[in-house]
Image (tube, grey):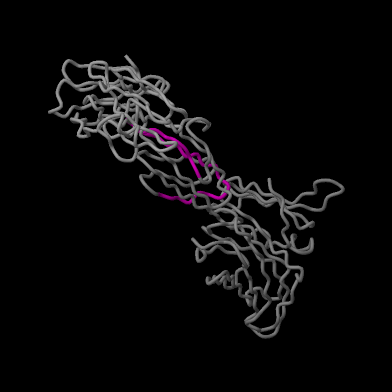
Amino acid sequence: HTTVEFNYGATAAYEKPAVTALQSPLSSSGVTTVTRFVADATNPTYYRVTATNGHYIVFDAGKSFTTTAAPGKKILSSTDANLPKSIPDNLPAGAASSLTLGVNDCPVVKGVEIYVNASHPSLTELTYRLDHATETADFVSSNTGTSSNFNNTAGAGLWQLTVADNQPGNTGTLEGWGMVFSCAARLDVNKTGTGTITSSTTGGAGSIACGDTCFSEFDLDSSVTLTATTTGNWAFDNWSGSCTCTYLNCPAAGACSLLMNAGKSATAEFVEIADFITYTMPDNSVYFVDQSKHSPAAWLWDFGDTPNNTSTLQDPIYSYQSVAAPFTVTLTASVGAQQHSVQKTVSPLVCGETSLAKITATYATLQEAYNAAGAGSEIMVHARPATSPITEGFPFDTNANNIIISGGFDCDFLINPSFTILGWPMTIGGNGSVTVEGLIIQ
């Protein structure tokens, strides 16, 4: 229940028979009962107006009322300190009064109902006009009414009522007035990757079922749950914007709940789980590097050749018997109870780089690279297995200036997953230091 001010004026105003008509637009089904009662000795007289849909207003001489309006309804009354106001005789300018809505009071207007309490010897001589932004609605000779003129406009700002007398001979009084707004809030949804986003709502209308980008307007103050679903190798990763959770901490898989008390936006990111890249090694084997998301607990590689060779290592190195034909490689990554698979075509290559070592330039021998190395240099050395070790003598016969020698590099000197075998003795002399890694001396 929400209690707000409703400026209806003196107690006598409530006792007019017009109270039934005054409240009749409370629902499209109309009012079923108007009940007058006294709550207790300390409270004034109350009226309870009940509609067929269960919506009701209780108001009293204290100028307040309580409403059970469903989500989507906003009930406001004028807080104009100058009420009541005199309605001049036969003057189009009439008596003007206003109320103001905040940015989130009614983000998108879907309908308005107006209730006016005015006194005049001949009420049929009065006209009622409502203005907001660039829109206007006229309620000729009626102190209540509904209008769709303001639909789909922003509710924020000034709403002005003008009550005018259009016949000579009488003046009147604008006692008070109020409005019931039907309101919505817009929810924009975006996504990256492949997946589907749907919505469910509690206490209001609105629906989302989108591909790349979509939006819907939901009843103000309704609760909306967005759910991100995927198939195949794609999985939900995270929500951002008005929704902020990840696959690790969302309350339900891919779900996010929002209270639509303002316009909001949310973005869902979907990612491919299983993924890998490859490097060609100097011996023409292939280094497979797992790039899977969401921290898999297990891997299964099918290298696509005959016989059907497999591996359960995270980052295996595999030697194909042929470098002529492309092979379809399948990686299956297990994340929790889910298995995600990706296939890629791999064409084993003959290493085109014949140099043995590299600093910034390449060198045919390890000794040449060492002799050219400056202080702090790293010498990258091709991987060499025991079946084809480096067979050059390698004396460090000059001063070593904090040089690093790293073995086990791939064909293009990008990564060193393996080792380099030195088949001959290595003699170290001089001063300084040499850091050696990825080298095995037979």
In the displayed structure, would residue 29 be above or below residue 376? below
Q: Judge by depth and name the residue closer to the eye, 395 or 410.
A: 395
Count of numbered circles on the image: 0
Q: Judge by depth and name the residue closer to the eye, 352 or 356.
A: 356
Q: What residue appears at the point 87 percent right and 47 percent down from the top-left corner? A: 41
User: Which quarter of the rendered picture does the N terminus lie within?
Assistant: top right
Q: Tell whether 250 sits left or right of 365.
A: right
Q: Position of residue 224 (x, y in %)?
A: 51, 42
**From this viewpoint, which residue is outermost toward the right?**
41
Q: What residue appears at the point 66 percent right and 62 percent down from the top-left corner? A: 178
Q: Position of residue 350 (x, y in %)?
A: 18, 30
Q: What residue appears at the point 13 percent right and 28 percent down from the top-left corner? A: 325
Q: Position of residue 331 (x, y in %)?
A: 30, 25
Magenta region, residue range: 214-240
Q: Position of residue 400 (x, y in %)?
A: 43, 30
Where is residue 194, by image quadrant? top left
Where is residue 306, by image quadrant? top left
Q: Tell whether 54 sits left or right of 195.
A: right
Q: Tell whether 130 sits left or right of 418.
A: right
**From this viewpoint, which residue is outermost toward the bottom?**
168
In the displayed structure, would residue 341 be above or below residue 36? above
Where is residue 439, by image quadrant? top left
**From this viewpoint, which residue is outermost toward the left?**
324
User: Which quarter of the rendered picture does the C terminus lie within?
Assistant: top left
Q: Judge by depth and name the residue closer to the eye, 72 or 29.
A: 72
Q: Magenta segment: does it hold 436?
A: no
**Magenta stretch: helix, strand or loop mostly:** strand
In the displayed structure, would residue 100 be above or below residue 265? below
Q: Judge by depth and name the residue closer to the eye, 115 or 250.
A: 250
